[in-house]
Each structure stands twice: as structure tokens, then as C-alpha cells.
Amino acid sequence: MKKDYRNRLLRYSKDIGELAEEVRLCQHDLQSQSEGTVIHYAVDTNILFFGVSPHRRADLGHVFFDDRLEDARTLALSLRRFLFERLCSFERPFLISHGHDAEARWAFETMLLRGVHEQIELEEELNDISEDFAFALSMANEPAELLEQALPKLANLLAHDDGPGQDYRRFAEIVETGRVQRLGLAFSTAPYFSELFKKEPELYGKFSVPRTLRDQISETRYRVDWGKVFETQGVSKNQYAMRCDVSALARIQLINERLSGTGHKVVLITADAALITTSKCVEIGPDKTFRDEFIRHPKAFLAAQSVLAPDQEAKGEELSVSNTVRLLDGWIKLLSDMMPALEEIETGGSKTKGDSEDFEALASKIKAGWRDHVAKLEEAHAASSNKYKRMIQGISEAGDETAVLKAMRDVARKKVAEVHSSWSEFFEQVLSTSYFVFDQAKLPIRPRSVPAIYFGRFHNAYDTIKRIAGDPKEKVSLDDIRALEGQDDGGYSYCLSFASLFASLGKWQTAELIADQALLRRSSETATTEDLSGRESYYVKSIAQRLQAKTPAQLTGARTSLQQSEACLDGEKNRASREWLRVRFRSEEAAIELAEVFLETQADEKPKKAELKRRILEISDKIAAALGQTHTIPDDWIRYQVTESLLTNLFIGATVLKNRGVKDSELTDKVNKITPVYAEYITSSADFEGGCRSFLGRAYFLFGKATYFPTTDADKRRFEGELTELERLYQDFKLLKVMPYDDDRFEQLFELVRKTIGESKKKT
């Protein structure tokens, strides 16, 4: 028994020591702030995740090894509230550094995808339960068995503290209220920094991105140094996460170096144990590490009074030392007094029963004190969804079983209506937040073209989609998208406008999920209605699935969706007026077949040269036939988009043959036959702002122009410039890589274009 209490106390001693180390760093910050130092807090992506999903990071509320889970969650919620409601605001936001902003973009899409899945699953489950209740009510027998099974299930669904898409909504709220902003953006939009730079204009250059050669060299050196430290410490992280951390730490180190002597500093809040441990190894002065000065764990802020006593301080007051510090000091003194007895037990000494009781009393006193300390937070953090818990409890305690079933059915239906109506809000947040997040990528050109979605009736949605597909520098406004919400009864075109937006950002998984949601917006009455049949949703899904495929087998979904799209057209009333849309389907078929060829060339057993030639020529025949039908497309924009896609795929096929030493005389004949279509496309480019908007299209059109069409010396010089620019773009912007074979194919393409230009120069 003595041993048990000894071990328990030693574990408490370790936990108390670790917490004391954290909160005393915060005390250090409070002291330096009282002496005039201004601290600007930056956050790691894991803190952004914590702000969005505190229920998923209960570990940040664990203080003692045997804490109850509900206590840890309560404390985590209190920390989250303090960090994101007290420590930051629009006026003075948390900063997110270079490196971590890239991780934030990934976090954004992860939460969006999870939110979409959760929303759909919850709506389906609630509908199932509603139907179960309705069925039970229709039966003559006693509904007790169903009630016993369904009531707990419904209670669990309704009492889920976070609900579908809730993580994403909190992320959107944090971003839209400006509580977290990129380094650089914050300095131009946050009122605090605007006022600061007016008073001290020399500070702006110290916070800004490295512009001078000296700063760029310094930051590069810091990145190299941090990389070596991570490597030396044997940090187990994937390379991408490590690069993000290294970039962020280097930028923070550079800014703090610039700020030295100004009374300002940037401190990074992170829950990354590996990063914290690594930062302890970087010395920045006598007995001073990078961790001591510039890194804080969120638990450090348990030193703030308002974390554990949220009602005792008004919003906006400065931080003050909490009872936590005094509590820790008391515990440390008690443990110090008890340590000789603990050590004697360890060495085999005998202690009296009274000593064991002392150990037990001390252990109980520590935990009871902490429980009391945390208990006051629980009511403040009761989930809003507790209204459903109370509702269910009240219903289940009153009335007969049939009355209970009717009441529960009504509750389920009410919740279904709430979930369904929340989609408009959810997607509006998707849109506005995506502008903040994905604008950071600043891609000068899209990796792939935006799907050529067609609406004949919904003119506003169609115009918006065409604008989304246009110049990447010209953004569609939030008001443009909001105006689409009531254009059709279910929001079908509204959803597809969002799908188009995410496709333009290269977020194909998200585009596919939103296209799925558009399909759910249809009703059985609209299955044969032009523009509401599902034709365009399945078309977007096909393209998105093709661009996510990693193996030939994964293209099955793309083929199925394309078949479903064409089947929707077959089922539409008055489809004869839209038969020309089949040219678009043939274009996508060719793209799928070419993707299959490329994916097969990545496999261990590559197709033989003769088989490869046969398949490419067969695909080229289909493309040429489709190009011969583009004149039937009455819509100028669709005709332009489809022609561009077909020509790009024709040139892709030609490069596959050339790169494998196949003589392309047969292919040249096919290209010559479609020269009038190419010429019309080039002429039409002036009407569509100058040609290809995608990196893929520009790269392969350069090959086509240099290989198959007459050129002058001036053209060849221009081609060389275009080639240099394309190579630079692909090197600088890794997001331009979409398919697993892109690195190989673009490397081969660039070499082929260079060779073609060189050979044509020799001929002249």
C-alpha cells in the first residue's frame, strides 16, 4: 500500500513539475510585459486545430496522469476560450508564420471534407430514425422494443456536442473575425498593427517578409540550422511537416533578431512536443534557449487568472497571475516536505502506519484540490446541444410509449430540418473562408482547367462559373455567389458553383464532395428537367475522380460518373436541343483513356511499344472525330473549352509516342486534318482573354505549336521564353503537380520541346 501511494505521489510530483515549468514561463512573460515588453503571439497549426476542435485535444487539458476525461475536456475548453477569445482579437490577432500557413491550408481542406461527410451522415441517420419511429407508430403492437433501441441512438446523435461541420464553422469564425492572420496580411488589416506602425514606422520593416539580400541569406541559414537540429534530435516527423516547422521557426528567429532592442518580440504558441524539445537545444545567449524566449505550450497560460476563474475578470483586462501558481507552490512545498519519507521507502526503510496515511492524505489532497479548481468551469462549458439531452430526458420520463414515440419522431424531424437548413450557411462559410486560406497559395496559373459546366436556364450561375474559369487574378465576389442561392428550389446550381470554385483551386476531392451534395438537392420531380437532372454534377464528379486516380483501377469511378452524366442527358425532356453536349462527354472519355495509359506506364509491367502506339492512335482517332463535331456546339464558351481540351489531349498523345521513339507521321496527318479547328480556336482566344488558363494546356499547346504548325524565327524565340517560364513555374509551385506521373511527363515534355525548337532552328 505504501508503495502504491509512493508511486502515485511520484507521478504527481512529475506532473506538477512539468506544469510548473510551463506556467513559470508565462509568469516570465507577464513580468517582462509589466516592464514594457510587447509580445506578439504566433500560433502553430496545431493550436489553430485546437481552437477549432478543442474536444479532439483533451490532452491539452490533462494535468495529472489520472485526470478524468471530462475534467481534461473542461480544462481544454477553458484554455481554448482564453486563447481565442481573450488573448487574440481582430484588433490584435494571432499571427501565423510562413511554413505554418501552408499547413493551415491543409487543415482547412481536411476540416471541410470531414464536415461534409459528417453533415451527410447525420442527416441520413436522423432520417432513418424518423422512419423507424413512424413505422413503429403504424404498428398495432407495443412499440417498447423499438423505443428501447432507438431512444439512446437518437439521444447520442442529438447530444453530440459538436455536430456536423462544427469544426469547419469554428475555423470559419476564427478566420472571418480576423483572430488569426498571416504574417504580412495582419500588418495591413489589423487595427492594432496599423496604429503601431503609425507610431513606430520603423517596426514595419522588421516584421515584414525578407526583402533584402542580407535578410534572405540569414533566413536561409536559419532554415539550414533548424533542419540540422531536427535531424540531430532524431525527430520523427514526415518531411513536409518538418519543412513547415523549419520555415516557421526560421522566420520567427529572423523577425526576433530584427526586433532585438525595440521592446517587441514574437512568441510561438505550440503543442508540438518535438518542436518544443528541439527548441530547447538552440541556445541564444548565456543560460537562455530559444524555447525559453520564444516558444510557449498552451498549458503555460494556466498561469492566467481567467483560465480557471473565467467569471472573475472582465473581457479585455490584462493577464494576471492565477491561483494555479499559488496552488503549484503549495503542492511543491508539501511534496518537498514529504520527499525524505518517500525516499526512505524506496531504499527499503520502514515507515509507520501514520506515514502511509500521510501519503494517502497528501495524494487525496492534491487531487481534491485540483478537482475543486476545475469544477467551477464545467457549467460554463456545457454544450449548447444539452437542450436536446434535457428534451429527450423530459419526454422519456412522461407519457405512455406511443406518446413518447410521437414526441421523439417530432424531435428527430426538427433536427433533420435544422441540419438541412444549415447547409446554406455552411457553404457560404466555405466560400468566404476559402478566399482567405487558398489566396495564400497565390498560384499564377491553374494546374488544370475548370470543368466546362453548362446551364441553359440558370443564367446567373452560368455566368459566375464562366468567371470562375476565367483569369485567376479576377476573383468572383462573395455577393456573386450569395445571389445564386435562390436561383433554383434545392440549391443545385448554387452547390455546383461552389464545386467549380474548388475545382479552380485544384481541390478536386472537395469539388467531388460538393458535386455529390448537389445531387442530393435534386428532387424526383426534376430528374427529367433540363439543368436539374444531375447531368452536370456527374460530369464534375467524373473529372474530379479522374484527377484523383493513382492507379488505372481507380479510374472506374470516373467512367461510371461520366456514364451517369450521359444517362441523365438521355432522360431529359427535349434532349434533342442539347445533343451537342455529347461532344463534351467524348472529350472527357479521351482524357480518362489517356490517364489510364499514363498510369499504366508507371506500373512495373509497362505496355509494349506496339500496343502503346495502337492505343494512342485509337484515342487520337476519337479525338479527331470529336474535334470534327465541335462546330455543332452553339455555346461559344463550351465550344472553346471543349476544343481546348481535345487539342490538349491530342498533343498529349503525340508526346507519348515521340518520347518512346514512335514515328508520328500518322499522327501528323491527323493533326493536319484538324488544322482549321485549331485556327478557329486560336482566333477565339482573343474573345476568351488570351488562351489556356491551365498549366497543362499551356505546356502541351507549346509543344503543338512548335511541332505541327508553321513558325517564324520570332516565334521560336518566343517559344524558348515560354518554355523557360513554364519550367520555372513548375519548379517553384509544387501545387502544379496533380497526377502521380506529372513530374516524369513534364520533364520529358520540356526536353522534347527544347529539342524540337533546336531542330527547327537548324533547318532554318
Image (cartoon, helix red, strand yellow):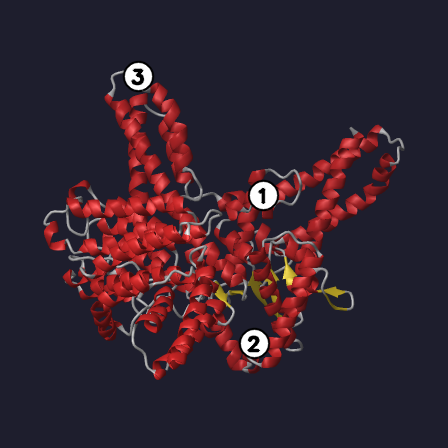
Q: Residue at x 24, y 63 (%)?
A: 643
Q: Residue at x 71, y 47 (%)?
A: 16
- Amino acid tagged 3: Glu
Q: Residue 387 placed where, x, y %?
A: 39, 39
Which quadrant would residue 149 be assigned to in this image?
top left
Q: Is residue 674 visible?
A: no
- Amino acid tagged 2: Pro
- Location of mark 2 (residue): 210
For residue 117, above or below residue 624: above
For residue 73, above or below residue 433: above
- The span from disc 1 to disc 3 (Cα, nearest Å) is 43 Å
Which quadrant would residue 621 be assigned to in this image?
bottom left
- Location of mark 3 (residue): 142
Q: Residue at x 16, y 46 (%)?
A: 570
- Mark 1 or mark 2: whose residue is earlier in sequence: 1
> How many callouts does the rendering have?
3
- Assign a secondary structure to mark 1: helix
Looking at the picture, tell me which residue is in the foreground, 515 or 298.
515
Q: Residue at x 33, y 55 (%)?
A: 616
- Mark 2 or mark 3: whose residue is earlier in sequence: 3
- Location of mark 1 (residue): 72
Looking at the picture, tell me which residue is in the foreground, 744 or 47.
744
